[in-house]
């Protein structure tokens, strides 16, 4: 893999890394392309509205960096939106306003609470939260067509009290299959996000059984990202990617430019 298309910088509230640091880190690791996908979680009730970046400033900083390093690496500019059902129309207008190369739609909050904060797990069991997350994810993608791929499906498992202990594809197949069918029906892709392994899970997101099911149902658009928030996490465990995707039945992965997918054969 020579491209990482899920990457954060100090434009995201959970990163302190300047975009130039991330670019230099990607060059050092031998990447040919990277795509910034900083967080835009509008109305995140736990972080607050001040923690989303200003799009004009985002492009003002990133476009000159793209030009500065164009002979060393292809820098693309994307965004990771935080899906919530009532924000579908907002994001539809938001992504039209700016020349993003790539839009990841991710579920970071359910019931207007940030999953990573852990407060929901004090009230519900892991299994209840996992099911609620898949239910809200399905609602999100039925309403929202503004994104290109669904980010880190089963991300919620990172934050469970017992993590993957209560998570099997088969236990939630009714909802997961609906999510995958809806993505395929709308021509949306699915992300292979290597941060699951980085955070201690025995699998990347989504679980290999989910990847296989997406392929069985006719899914073709798979993007690959490390979800790095600092240079050392760029291209995290990318040496595993080809095997993961091939075992799920894929021969290609996708990269986006100007919101259009381009397919690359797996080595």
Image (cartoon, rainbow, N blue to C red):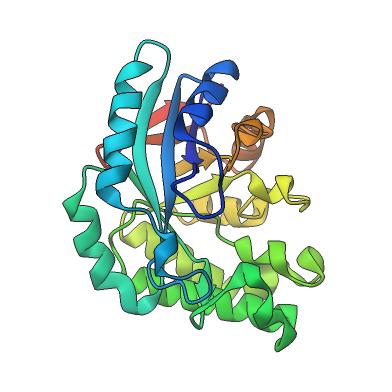
Residue at the image position 64 percent from the left and 36 percent from the top: 233
Furthest-top residue in view?
71
- Residue 65 in sight: yes
Residue 150 image-quadrant placement = bottom left
Residue 251, compared with residue 249, is above or below; it is above
Q: Residue 236: horizontal and vertical position, in percent?
A: 65, 34
Residue 267 image-quadrant placement = top right
Q: Residue 255: horizontal and vertical position, in percent?
A: 39, 34
Residue sitting nearer the eye, 80 or 165? 80
- Residue 220 in sight: no
Q: Is residue 214 left or right of residue 118?
A: left
Residue at the image position 52 percent from the left and 21 percent from the top: 24
Q: Is residue 155 left or right of residue 104?
A: right
Q: Is residue 46 left or right of residue 205?
A: left
Q: Residue 126: horizontal and vertical position, in percent?
A: 73, 78
Residue at the image position 49 percent from the left and 54 percent from the top: 151
Q: Residue 234: horizontal and vertical position, in percent?
A: 59, 33
Furthest-bottom residue in view?
123
Residue at the image position 37 percent from the left and 67 percent from the top: 42
Residue 11, compared with residue 81, is above or below; it is above
Count of numbered circles in the view: 0
Q: Is residue 34 left or right of residue 15?
A: left
**The N terminus lies in quadrant:** top right
């Amino acid at each position: 893999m020579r491209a990482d298309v899920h990457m954060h910088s100090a434009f995201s509230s959970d990163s302190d890394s300047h975009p130039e640091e991330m670019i230099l880190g990607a060059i050092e690791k031998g990447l040919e392309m990277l795509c910034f996908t900083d967080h835009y979680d509008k109305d995140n009730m736990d972080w607050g509205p001040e923690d989303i970046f200003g799009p004009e400033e985002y492009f003002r900083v990133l476009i000159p960096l793209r030009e500065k390093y164009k002979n060393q690496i292809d820098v693309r500019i994307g965004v990771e939106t935080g899906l919530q059902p009532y924000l579908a129309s907002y994001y539809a207008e938001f992504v039209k306003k700016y020349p993003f190369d790539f839009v990841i739609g991710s579920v970071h909050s359910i019931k207007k609470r940030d999953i990573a904060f852990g407060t929901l797990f004090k009230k519900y069991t892991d299994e209840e939260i996992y099911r609620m997350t898949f239910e809200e994810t399905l609602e999100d993608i039925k309403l929202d067509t503004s994104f290109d791929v669904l980010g880190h499906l089963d991300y919620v498992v990172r934050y469970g009290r017992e993590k993957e202990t209560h998570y099997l594809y088969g236990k939630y197949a009714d909802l997961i299959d609906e999510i995958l069918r809806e993505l395929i029906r709308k021509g949306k892709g699915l992300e292979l996000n290597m941060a699951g392994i980085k955070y201690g899970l025995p699998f990347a997101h989504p679980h290999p059984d989910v990847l296989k099911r997406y392929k069985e149902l006719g899914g073709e658009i798979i993007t690959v990202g490390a979800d790095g928030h600092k240079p050392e996490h760029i291209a995290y465990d990318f040496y595993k990617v080809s095997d993961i995707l091939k075992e799920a039945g894929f021969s290609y992965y996708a990269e986006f430019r100007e919101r259009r997918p381009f397919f690359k054969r797996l080595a």
